[in-house]
């Protein structure tokens, strides 16, 4: 076999290997991009409970296509804010890890910043990750990293300082 033929064959094999690796990475990225915090669709959610440190628990129910605060006398709730809360169910997960990989106290899950229940499925929000603008979220026995934009906010926009 001539030297030029061997060189071309080597280049062809190298390019083929790179294409195969690229295809594998793209497939892997697509699989991970589809992972969300919960498997329920945001528009299907009808019950919300939200507990933030330093504030009383808020209870909401969806009736006739509108959100109502059900603490005490039912009153209409801020549809935009409740839409934000339901969208958390569809938050893209950057990575999943078992809870056993962490010390819950170190990632803020001993006393979560927020606890959000969407149709009875509990999400506990911990500290911000040191690797970027991401937050730890406990879902059952697993911990997800999600963008900080999915952190629940209080109804008034103000939050009392948590007790130490």
Image (cartoon, rainbow, N blue to C red):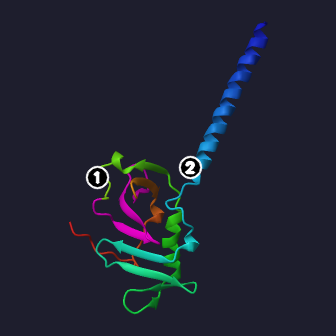
Left or right: residue 83 versus residue 112 is right
Question: From this viewpoint, which residue is outermost toward the front?
Answer: 120
Q: Residue at x 32, y 59 (%)?
A: 109
Left or right: residue 25 versus residue 163 is right
Q: Is residue 158 above or below residue 107?
A: below
* Picture quadrant where residue 3 is located: top right
Q: Position of residue 100 (x, y in %)?
A: 34, 47
Q: Is residue 137 above or below residue 13?
A: below
Secondary structure beneath label 2: helix
Whichever of callouts 2 and 1 sits on the residue coming sooner in the sequence is: 2
Check if residue 99 falls in the magenta segment: no
The residue singled out by tag 1 in the image is 106
Q: Position of residue 64 (x, y in %)?
A: 57, 87
The quarter in which the N terminus is drawn is top right
Question: From this viewpoint, which residue is outermost toward the left?
Answer: 164
Q: CA distance from mark 2 to mark 1?
A: 26 Å
The residue singled out by tag 2 in the image is 32
The quarter in which the C terminus is drawn is bottom left
Residue range of the region highlighted in magenta in the rendering: 110-139
Q: Is residue 50 above or below residue 69?
A: above
């Amino acid at each position: 076999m001539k030297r030029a033929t061997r060189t071309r064959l080597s280049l062809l094999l190298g390019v083929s290997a790179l294409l195969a690796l690229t295809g594998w990475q793209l497939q892997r990225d697509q699989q991970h991009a589809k992972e969300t915090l919960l498997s329920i669709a945001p528009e299907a959610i009808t019950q919300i409970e939200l507990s933030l440190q330093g504030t009383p628990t808020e209870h909401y129910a969806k009736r006739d296509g509108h959100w109502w605060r059900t603490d005490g006398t039912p009153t209409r709730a801020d549809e935009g804010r409740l839409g934000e809360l339901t969208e958390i169910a569809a938050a893209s997960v950057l990575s999943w890890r078992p809870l056993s990989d962490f010390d819950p106290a170190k990632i803020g899950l001993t006393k979560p910043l927020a606890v959000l229940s969407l149709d009875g499925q509990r999400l506990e929000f911990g500290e911000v990750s040191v690797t970027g603008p991401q937050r730890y979220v406990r879902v059952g026995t697993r911990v997800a990293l999600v963008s900080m934009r999915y952190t629940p906010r209080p109804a008034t926009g103000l939050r009392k300082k948590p007790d130490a």
